[in-house]
Image (tube, rainbow, N blue to C red):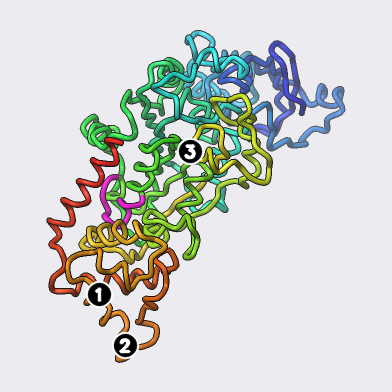
């Protein structure tokens, strides 16, 4: 059916519990942007069905209306403008509709429940310093597509009854799309946002849907997640075995175009083998919206110039999947805020010199930790230390780069190249650092950890902390 406009009436015949047709008179009212509400329900007889060229007993099981779905008289899980039950064909159906109408409040009485018109976003959400490098979905159709892609049966992160933590949502276009999904998909939506202009359009979601909790904290700060535990919003999250994907918890985030965004991605992947942060609950899936340039670094294969530490750790730690085709998010201006003059790029590439600037192509991905981790919590500091130091010289042969790990580290050449080792346990030390495969890195780390003169875990942790603080200061 064509999309309705406000005030336009539509009719639908739906089979209900006692087998009679119910005539639904639909009066479209804008709710949550592009969603429309049913405001009148009446029954008609079989004779009236015939008058309207319907056969008694004929069933219409599914009906898509705007962005809402009506299936077997079950109302979609978003706010209704009103619901008048004049007559319904069974008490059970009437009770269902009344329960839904009580549960979902009217958005019409809640200020800023609806987002501003898309062509006015630059006025309502100016590209101020606090949000200068923040990118968020603004197109409602794109938001719907992304939300569905995270829970589609083909998604590696699929599941139902999810408790979602959404970080950096912007004004909440994706948040609203998540709430438009069937209620069986999402049991709770916890939103993390600290930008005042965005909070004005996120707070109303708490009033409209009891599943929503808005926390005015940044998703970048680790203390924020401690606050979630202290406030009790994660009390119903179970700690699950690593044999299976976590059945409840799911993390979704836009990633900013700056150093903090890069640090966040690196830390998220580092937390997987550490089994820290949300991963202390189990194999929690993540869905991330990030720049093409950042994603290129994460998935760069051995030999690529973009190969880096975060890519090696990601390859060792998690399965990665595009949730939608990258071309479906092009050009940038059609899908994301802020829309910048000249930001749109061709469908075949982007300007690499501006790779970290807002306006570059965006990618949406699903990430699921592996059940078996190559990197253990005990060896994580060593992997951090070795990868960081070696990738500084990514175009240098391994034989020369080893000496920069620590004094005397050149002695590691022997356990890496000895002819006493099986061929698959030797490393070609003539290869450049960026050419090493994950299997090569595993052998390098084994030799390093078995080396009697390797730096202590305390020394490596201090070096890691120093580098982290130095990066934040830049």
CA–CA distance between discs 2 and 1? 12 Å
Disc 1 is placed on an element classified as helix
Disc 2 is placed on an element classified as loop
Q: Position of residue 297 (x, y in %)?
A: 46, 52
Q: Nearer the viewer, residue 369 or 28?
A: 369
Whether pointer 2 and pointer 3 mark residues with C-beta atoms closer than 8 Å, the reply is no
CA–CA distance between discs 1 and 3? 36 Å
* Residue 447 image label: 1
Q: Main secondary structure of the magenta part?
A: helix
**Category of crowding for the residue at label 1, using alpha-carbon neighbours closer than 10 angstroms: few (below 14), some (14–19), many (at least 20):** some
* Magenta span of residues: 269-277
Relative height, residue 248 to residue 260 (above, below): below
Closer to the N terminus: mark 2 or mark 1?
Answer: 2
- Residue at image x 65%, y 37%? 345
* Residue 356 image label: 3
* Residue 138 image label: none
Q: Position of residue 349 (x, y in %)?
A: 64, 45
If the image is split into quadrants, where does the C terminus sit? Answer: top left
* Residue 421 image label: 2
Q: Is residue 392 left or right of residue 319?
A: left
Question: Dividing the picture into quarters, in which one does residue 216 lie?
Answer: top left
**Category of crowding for the residue at label 3, using alpha-carbon neighbours closer than 10 angstroms: few (below 14), some (14–19), many (at least 20):** some
CA–CA distance between discs 2 and 3? 44 Å
If the image is split into quadrants, where does the N terminus sit? Answer: top right
Q: Which numbered disc, 2 or 3, marks the residue closer to the eye?
A: 3
- Residue at image x 38%, y 70%? 397
């Amino acid at each position: 059916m064509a999309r309705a406009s406000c005030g336009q009436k539509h009719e639908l015949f739906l089979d209900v519990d006692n087998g009679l047709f119910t005539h639904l008179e639909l009066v479209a009212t804008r709710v949550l942007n592009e969603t429309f509400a049913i405001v009148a329900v009446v029954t008609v007889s079989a004779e009236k069905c015939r008058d309207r060229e319907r056969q008694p007993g004929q069933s219409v099981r599914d009906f898509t209306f705007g962005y809402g779905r009506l299936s077997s008289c079950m109302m979609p899980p978003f706010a209704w403008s009103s619901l008048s039950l004049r007559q319904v064909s069974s008490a059970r159906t009437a009770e269902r509709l009344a329960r839904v109408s009580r549960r979902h409040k009217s958005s019409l009485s809640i200020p800023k429940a609806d987002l501003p018109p898309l062509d006015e976003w630059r006025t309502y959400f100016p590209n101020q310093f606090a949000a200068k490098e923040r990118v968020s979905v603004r197109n409602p159709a794109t938001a719907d597509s992304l939300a569905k892609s995270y829970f589609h049966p083909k998604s590696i992160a699929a599941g139902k009854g999810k408790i979602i933590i959404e970080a950096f949502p912007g004004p909440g276009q994706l948040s609203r799309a998540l709430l438009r999904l069937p209620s069986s998909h999402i049991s709770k939506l916890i939103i993390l946002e600290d930008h005042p202009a965005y909070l004005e359009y996120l707070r109303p979601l708490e009033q409209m849907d009891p599943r929503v909790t808005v926390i005015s904290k940044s998703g970048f700060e680790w203390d924020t997640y401690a606050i979630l535990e202290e406030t009790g919003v994660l009390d119903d999250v179970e700690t699950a075995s690593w044999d299976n994907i976590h059945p409840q918890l799911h993390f979704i985030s836009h990633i900013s175009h700056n150093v903090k965004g890069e640090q966040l991605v690196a830390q998220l992947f580092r937390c997987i083998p550490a089994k820290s942060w949300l991963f202390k609950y189990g194999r929690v899936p993540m869905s991330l919206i990030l720049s093409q340039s950042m994603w290129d670094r994460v998935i760069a294969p051995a030999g690529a110039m973009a190969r880096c530490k975060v890519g090696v750790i990601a390859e060792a730690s998690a399965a990665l999947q595009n949730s939608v085709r990258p071309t479906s998010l092009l050009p940038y201006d059609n899908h994301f805020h802020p829309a910048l003059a000249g930001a749109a790029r061709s469908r075949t590439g982007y300007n690499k010199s501006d790779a970290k600037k807002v306006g570059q192509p965006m990618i949406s991905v699903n990430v699921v930790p592996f059940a078996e981790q190559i990197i253990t919590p005990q060896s994580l500091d060593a992997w951090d230390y070795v990868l960081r130091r070696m990738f500084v010289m990514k175009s240098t042969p391994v034989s020369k780069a080893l000496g920069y790990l620590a004094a005397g580290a050149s002695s590691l050449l022997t356990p890496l190249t000895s002819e006493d080792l099986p061929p698959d346990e030797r490393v070609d030390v003539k290869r450049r650092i960026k050419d090493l495969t994950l299997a090569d890195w595993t052998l390098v780390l084994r030799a390093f950890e078995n080396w009697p003169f390797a730096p202590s875990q305390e020394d490596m942790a201090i070096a890691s902390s120093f580098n982290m603080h130095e990066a934040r200061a830049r």
